[in-house]
Image (cartoon, helix red, strand yellow):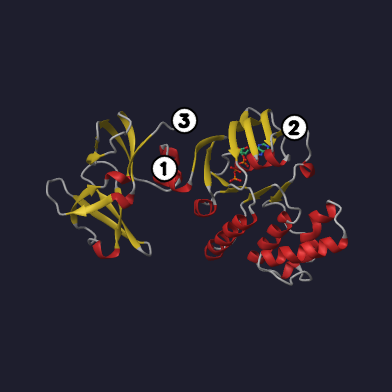
Amino acid sequence: MLRLDGATVRFGARAALDAVDLEVADHETVCVLGPSGSGKSTLLRAVAGLQALDGGRVLLGGADQRGVPVHRRGVGLMFQDHQLFPQRDVGGNVAFGLRMHGAGKAEQTERVRELLDLVGLPGAERRAVSALSGGEQQRVALARALAPRPRLLMLDEPLGQLDRGLRERLVVELRQLFGRLGTTVLAVTHDQGDAFALADRVVVMRDGRIAQSGAPVEVWSRPASEFVARFLGFDNVVAARVTGAVAETVWGKIPVPDDAPQGERRLLVRPGGVRIVPVEEAPAWTVESRTFRGSHVVVRLRPADGPPLDAELPLREVPGEGAEVGVDFRTEDVVVLGDDTP
Ligand SMILES: Nc1ncnc2c1ncn2[C@@H]1O[C@H](COP(=O)(O)OP(=O)(O)OP(=O)(O)O)[C@@H](O)[C@H]1O
């Protein structure tokens, strides 16, 4: 459906998009995430035709899009900066793209009705957009983007400023909706929660390049590099010397998977893989703090030497602050990280 071949965009000396290769299959939902300034919006704008390439190609359905204007690319856009038209009512907003495509009045009316049903706002045609809540406006923007039946739907921060509870509900709705419609989606978000819940595949960007691409569970369980691990919020990263299935670290010897890369490495221990055991051999760990996180508690452990280690523990297993404990590591939660440079 969509292919980027060495897509490059430069602003002055800086490459906002640096020779990016990416494919999105029919019916696939791909979420691009990454820190601010990593090139996510530039990627979307380049695909939409809002940003010219300095190198490489964008292909849609196999056809090179060089010189093809935005409105001829057959893509639907729901962008942060493409707000609803305040002077038009809900129906007028949703019908906008249809009118541009020369649809007749009756067809417009029917399609608007269908889309408002679809996004959960049946009968809202005559409402003023200024009278809608943030979540309702987001739904109208989505209906507007979907109305002309785009072959590719592109979303930039689709859940933008909405509060946590509402985003979580909308993400589930969006995922169901895209599944039902068979829409191909390329979305950009800085929110990992949204990306992981929405996507069939996530693409993590760094400095205009792809740092990692994979199914949500794959990226989550096997971050490719320290950059990706830290971006996902994992802080248990330490220097290690890996020999066979054992890593030597300031945290002691840690078991690693059999096929782990060898030698001097960086090591990630997911907090869920740290278990508390009785102190068997000195030096012990000290419980520095405990943070309640709903279904579990994050316990920060201070070793005799080296950086602190976070453990994610069930509520009933939490030791008191100041307690001296031993730790044990679960191999499945230990990841030997690759190099940072993609
Ligand atoms: N029109 C422009 N002129 C100059 N530099 C630009 C322009 N647009 C983007 N940039 C730069 O290109 C880089 C990538 O920007 P981009 O907006 O694609 O990042 P982003 O990942 O979408 O960030 P955010 O999450 O903050 O929206 C940034 O360094 C940005 O400052």
Residue 86 visible:
no
Q: Is residue 177 above or below residue 302?
A: below
Q: Which residue is drawn at 41% across and 31% down?
A: 339
Q: Can residue 15 be seen in this view?
A: yes
Sequence-wise, the earlier of marks 3 and 2 is 2
Instruction: Where is residue 275? Give x, y as percent.
Output: 24, 52
Q: How far apart are marks 2 and 1 (CA)?
A: 36 Å
Residue 166 shown left or right of residue 105 in the figure: left
Q: In which quarter of the image is residue 269?
A: top left
Q: Residue 229 carries which label?
A: 1
Tell me: 171 left or right of 255: right
**Residue under circle 2?**
66
In this picture, is 38 found above or below 138? above
Q: Along the line of sight, which residue is nearer the eye, 178 or 289?
A: 178
Where is ligand 1, by quadrant?
top right
Between discs 2 and 1, the one toward the N terminus: 2
Rendered residue at 58%/62% (across/down): 173
Q: Which amino acid does label 3 sit on?
A: Thr
Amino acid tagged 1: Ala
- Label 1 or label 3, whichever comes before in sequence order: 1
Numbered tag placed on residue 341 in the rendering: 3
Which amino acid type is shown beneath numbered disc 2? Answer: Arg
Expressed as whole percent of the image width and height from the top left, the position of residue 74 reads: 75, 45
